[in-house]
């Protein structure tokens, strides 16, 4: 699940995966507005770990399908927070 989480967020604007994902944790540099907005939405994770700028996103060893659904929602929430809105093209 951690690798799936890392794959889902690694290409988002302003996100950097800090270390290789070899266990159940993803350490990622997240923009502070994204951290604040995700906490406001009820997502719980540690911040200021590792290199002090990193968030520690943990996945359980006994993850269920419901957890996977929540993980997908986490990625969707993060994408909505860090992706700038599209600017309409004028022709």
Image: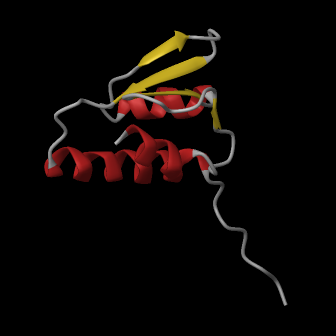
> How many circles with numbers are drawn on the protein?
0
**In screen coordinates, is 69 left or right of 71?**
left
- Please, is residue 19 above or below residue 83 in the view? above
Residue 57 locus on image (x, y percent)? 42, 27
Q: What's the residue at 40%, 28% (across, down)?
A: 23
Q: What's the residue at 49%, 51% (across, down)?
A: 8
Question: Looking at the figure, which quarter contains the N terminus?
Answer: top left
Q: What's the residue at 49%, 15% (across, down)?
A: 47
Residue 81 shows up from this direction: no
Question: Looking at the figure, which quarter contains the C terminus?
Answer: bottom right
Residue 13 locus on image (x, y percent)? 68, 47
Residue 51 locus on image (x, y percent)? 65, 11
Q: Quadrant of residue 58?
A: top left
Q: Residue furthest right?
A: 91
Q: Residue furthest bottom?
A: 91
Residue 77 shows up from this direction: yes
Q: Nearer the viewer, residue 7 or 14?
A: 7
Q: Nearer the viewer, residue 14 or 9?
A: 9
**In screen coordinates, is 68 left or right of 36?**
left
**In screen coordinates, is 75 left or right of 33?**
left
Q: What colouring style does the render use?
A: secondary structure
Residue 37 locus on image (x, y percent)? 46, 33
């Amino acid at each position: 699940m951690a690798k799936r989480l890392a794959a889902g967020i690694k290409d988002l604007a302003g996100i950097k995966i800090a270390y290789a994902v070899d266990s159940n944790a993803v350490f990622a540099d997240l923009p502070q507005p994204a951290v604040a907005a995700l906490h406001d939405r009820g997502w719980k994770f540690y911040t200021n770990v590792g290199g002090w700028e990193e968030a520690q996103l943990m996945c359980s060893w006994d993850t269920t399908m419901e957890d996977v659904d929540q993980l997908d929602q986490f990625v969707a929430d993060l994408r909505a927070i860090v992706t700038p809105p599209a600017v309409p093209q004028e022709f």
